[in-house]
Amino acid sequence: MSVETYVPEKKVPNTPVVTATASAVKHFEQKLKAMPGKIIRLSTKLSGCTGFAYVVDYANEPAADDEVVTLSDTVVVAVAKDALPILKNTELDYVKEGINGILKFNNPNVVDACGCGESFSVA
């Protein structure tokens, strides 16, 4: 007989709510070159048949209650306060598919997504 001890996951202080792959950072750097002083702002909205959709905007500065994540010297991402629990631990990735490029959200909180990929739900 063996005994296992459950050790709850410790929250690491200052762990960013979102991270990004090198290709996503490069994509954002390219986009922001033409918009000096702008930042990326992530939020969510109610949409589609399963609940939420991602919103990626450009902003001059974060809102007062945004969580700010610095991805590089030139890329700052602000995450809307109401989107924090939905986007927690999400990895942003930029993937080339043929001649098209797409920003992908590798979100561990998603439990269901619609067939067309427009919306998702979380637990």
Image (spheres, rainbow, N blue to C red):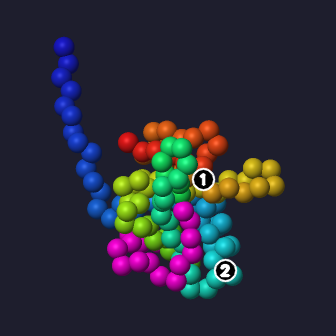
Q: Which mark is residue 33?
A: 2
**Magenta segment includes 57:** yes
- Compared to 67, does 108 lie above or below? above
Quadrant in the rendering for residue 65: bottom left
Residue contact between numbered discs 1 and 2, judged by CB atoms under 8 Å: no
- Circle 1 sits on which residue? 104
Q: Residues within 10 Å of mark 2 (few under 14, many from 20)?
A: few
Quadrant of the image for the N terminus?
A: top left
Q: Position of residue 52 (x, y in %)?
A: 49, 52
Quadrant in the rendering for residue 108: top left
Q: Position of residue 55 (x, y in %)?
A: 54, 62
Q: Disc 2 on helix, strand or loop?
A: helix
- Compared to 115, does 80 lie above or below? below
Q: Amino acid at mark 1?
A: Lys
From this viewpoint, which residue is outermost toward the bottom? 37
Q: Position of residue 42 (x, y in %)?
A: 50, 65
Q: Position of residue 99 (x, y in %)?
A: 81, 55
Q: Residue at x 62, y 69 (%)?
A: 28
Quadrant in the rendering for residue 109: top left
Q: Earlier in the sequence, mark 1 or mark 2?
A: 2
Q: Amino acid at mark 2?
A: Lys
Q: Which residues are magenta?
A: 55-70
Quadrant of the image for the C terminus?
A: top left
